Image (tube, rainbow, N blue to C red):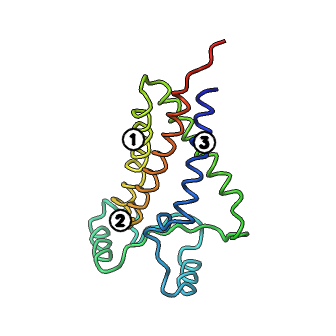
């Protein structure tokens, strides 16, 4: 129960921090840009990409990576055109309603915090080391997920830095909550 309560406290702290970083600070918007002609882009996406999925352009079919001529043509196209990493999703039925996404975010925060609390509770660390441990967990997530997106799919550097800020501050604050709860003395009856 001690681990579950620590995770719940951390999830609440993470959720509040994410609200602050995405709604009150510019951290959540780092790397995002507005298209120059949104209607034209949406029309092309609808007709050129069609079904929901992840696209990167210029594209080469992985089955053609052994074909020297196909790879050369793709490399030339890549040199001459901008690179795009595009996520296409079905139309949003209620763009202003975020209830499901907020619920999902809190649940995933709780599950991540549950893993972190379980790991931190298994240590003999004191408060400060547990806080640094939680920060390390956040940095691990950033290094394992966002940095490869920058490296392989050319995500903008400011987007990746925003993710670093978001994860570092969030897990530092969550770590304080977890370390405080896990370090409390248990009442003896």
Q: Quadrant of residue 30?
A: bottom left
Disc nearer the start of the sequence (1/2)? 1
Helix, strand or loop for disc 1: helix
- Write down the residue under mark 3: 110
| Number of other residues with Cα within 10 Å of mark 1, as a class: few under 14, some 14 to 19, many 20 or more | some
Q: State how far apart marks 1 and 3 are (Cα).
A: 17 Å
Q: Residue at x 59, y 53 (%)?
A: 16
Can residue 35 be seen in the rendering of this structure?
Answer: yes
Q: Closest to the observer: 83 or 73?
A: 83
Task: Where is residue 31? Give x, y as percent.
Answer: 43, 69
Task: Where is residue 134? Give x, y as percent.
Answer: 45, 39
Can residue 63 be seen in the rendering of this structure?
Answer: no
Helix, strand or loop for disc 3: helix
Q: State how far apart marks 2 and 3 are (Cα).
A: 28 Å
Q: Is residue 54 above or below residue 43?
A: above
Q: Closest to the observer: 140 or 187?
A: 187
Q: Is residue 10 above or below residue 73?
A: above
- Callout 1 touching callout 3 (CB < 8 Å): no
- Write down the residue under mark 1: 136
Horizontally, is 55 left or right of 186 in the view?
A: left
| Front label number (1 vs 2) | 1
Disc nearer the start of the sequence (1/3)? 3
- Quarter of the image for the N terminus: give it: top right
Horizontally, is 68 left or right of 94 in the view?
A: left
Q: Which mark is residue 157?
A: 2
Number of dots carrying numbers: 3
Horizontally, is 161 left or right of 96 in the view?
A: left
Q: Is residue 184 above or below residue 137?
A: above
């Amino acid at each position: 129960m001690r681990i579950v309560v620590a995770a719940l406290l951390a999830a609440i702290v993470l959720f509040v921090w994410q609200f602050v970083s995405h709604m009150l600070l510019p951290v959540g918007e780092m790397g995002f840009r507005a298209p120059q002609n949104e209607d034209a882009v949406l029309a092309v996406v609808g007709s050129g990409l069609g079904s929901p999925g992840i696209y990167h352009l210029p594209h080469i079919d992985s089955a053609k990576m052994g074909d020297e001529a196909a790879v050369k043509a793709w490399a030339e196209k890549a040199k001459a055109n901008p690179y795009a990493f595009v996520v296409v999703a079905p139309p949003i039925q209620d763009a202003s309603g975020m209830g499901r996404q907020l619920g999902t975010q809190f649940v995933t925060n709780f599950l991540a915090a549950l893993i972190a609390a379980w790991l931190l509770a298994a240590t003999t660390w004191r408060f400060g080391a547990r806080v640094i441990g939680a920060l390390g967990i956040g940095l691990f997530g950033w290094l394992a997920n966002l940095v490869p997106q920058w490296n392989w799919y050319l995500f903008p550097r400011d987007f990746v830095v925003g993710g670093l800020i978001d994860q570092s501050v969030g897990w530092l604050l969550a770590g304080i909550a977890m370390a405080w709860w896990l370090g409390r003395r248990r009442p003896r009856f």
